[in-house]
Image (cartoon, rainbow, N blue to C red):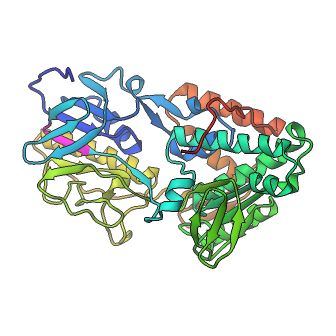
Amino acid sequence: MNIPNTNKPRIVVIGGGFAGISFLRNLKKSQFQVVLFDKRNYHTFQPLLYQVSTAGLEPDSIAYPLRKIFRKHEDFHFRLAEVHRIDTRQSTVHTSIGDLSFDHLVIATGTRTNFFGNKSIEEHSMPMKTVPQALNIRSLMLQNIEKADITDDPEERKCLLNFVIAGAGPTGVELAGALAEFRKGILKNDYPHIAQKDMQVHLVEGSDRVLSPMSTFASAKAKKFLEKMGVRVHLNTLVASYDGTTVTTSEGKTFDAATFIWAAGVTGSPVETNNGKIEFARGNRYPVNEFNQVDGHTNLYALGDVAYMPTEQFPQGHPQVAQPAIQQGRRLASNIMRLQKGKKMLPFRYTDKGTMATIGRNKAVADIKKMRFAGLFAWILWMVVHLFFLVGFRNRVVTFFNWTYNYINYDKAARLIIRPYKRN
């Protein structure tokens, strides 16, 4: 794979998500050779994937080339590859382009969609964890609306214009709100023969409230916002199956829907080890100590969503969102540099900066420490925070311009079927 030999300690990082990027950025001035492996050549700002899937943003607004992020870093090497196995005894990673030894290995592989073993949902539903998946949803949404515009069959039209989302966490809530806004802002102009009431958005949730990780205040406000926008919220409802046209719940209720988006859960995405067996913890995550070292290993670390670090405050591990990943990456970078200087590592302590979710135009909720916000102020706060954490000045400018344009014109300019979606 053409990595130069070096006398410096070699750090291998698997994954260019929030945790991996944070770790690498904080190693800029250190004396290491760093190799980053990822099966994509870009970093994805996942909190805004739903806007790509609902035609609010183009994918290049939320994706940024990994090589460009670190092009000024000395002795940094990116390799587009998939890591197949980790040999913990030989301190070697086996990848699709060859093998490489390491002194320190940082696993930041994040999560993948969890279908909970339901094969029909896995086969027919639309997940949304990557840019290609978000583009698939966008294409399918627009294709189904186009088909609905020309069909004379009322039952087919109803199925084509029914959108069902499973999971009322931040992703599901934001998707539902974005689809409701699409219905209001686009249909009457682009599809005058389709009545707004014909396009239905259903949000299905197994628990008794939306946004269950947030406060009851945020949950109640979000539900009120969604219902005011015309989203039909179904609580205490579990999806049992989906055959491509019909969503069936565990209670036997059915929805005829040509678009079914699965946002009901994630699971860790660890890398296989071929010796030195590692017992994965809750959620298919690596059990780590307070220094993010994988149990039983001193030079193997896990960060972010794939790390399981139970604490008194978070007995089930830290939330699988961006902030714990960013903070763990920053602390681990500091600790490895401390080790290099012969100093002791410092334990990781998570600082909860709050949780936010946007429902639509002027509608958002925010829990920040003991404060609760809803409405316009929370919506502006949500925009500012997300713009700040986007990677790259261009991405911030383009995203801000798109948001401003959409706000003024009630429009979503990225409604293009660039790559038609076909079910397998």
Horizontal placement of 149 versus 106: left or right? right
Q: Position of residue 9 (x, y in %)?
A: 13, 33
Q: Nearer the viewer, residue 344 or 112?
A: 112
Q: Nearer the viewer, residue 120 or 125?
A: 120
Check the image and name the residue furthest to the front: 153
Horizontal placement of 143 versus 128: left or right? right
The magenta-colored residue range is 102-106
Please indicate, yes or no, whether residue 65 appears anywhere in the rendered image. yes
Please indicate, yes or no, whether residue 334 appears anywhere in the rendered image. no
Q: Is residue 12 above or below residue 269?
A: above
Q: Position of residue 220 (x, y in %)?
A: 69, 71
In the image, what residue occupies the spot 66% across and 43% down? 140
Check the image and name the residue furthest to the right: 193
Locate residue 106: give its quadrant. Answer: top left
Q: Is residue 104 magenta?
A: yes
In the image, what residue occupies the spot 60% across and 60% down? 243
State the predominant SS element of the stretch in magenta.
Answer: strand
Q: Is residue 77 magenta?
A: no
In the image, what residue occupies the spot 26% across and 28% down? 29
In the image, what residue occupies the spot 25% across and 42% down? 84
Q: Is residue 166 above or below residue 95?
A: below
Locate residue 94: give its quadrant. Answer: top left
Q: Position of residue 82 (x, y in %)?
A: 30, 37
Q: Quadrant of the C terminus?
A: top right
Q: Is residue 352 above or below residue 398?
A: below
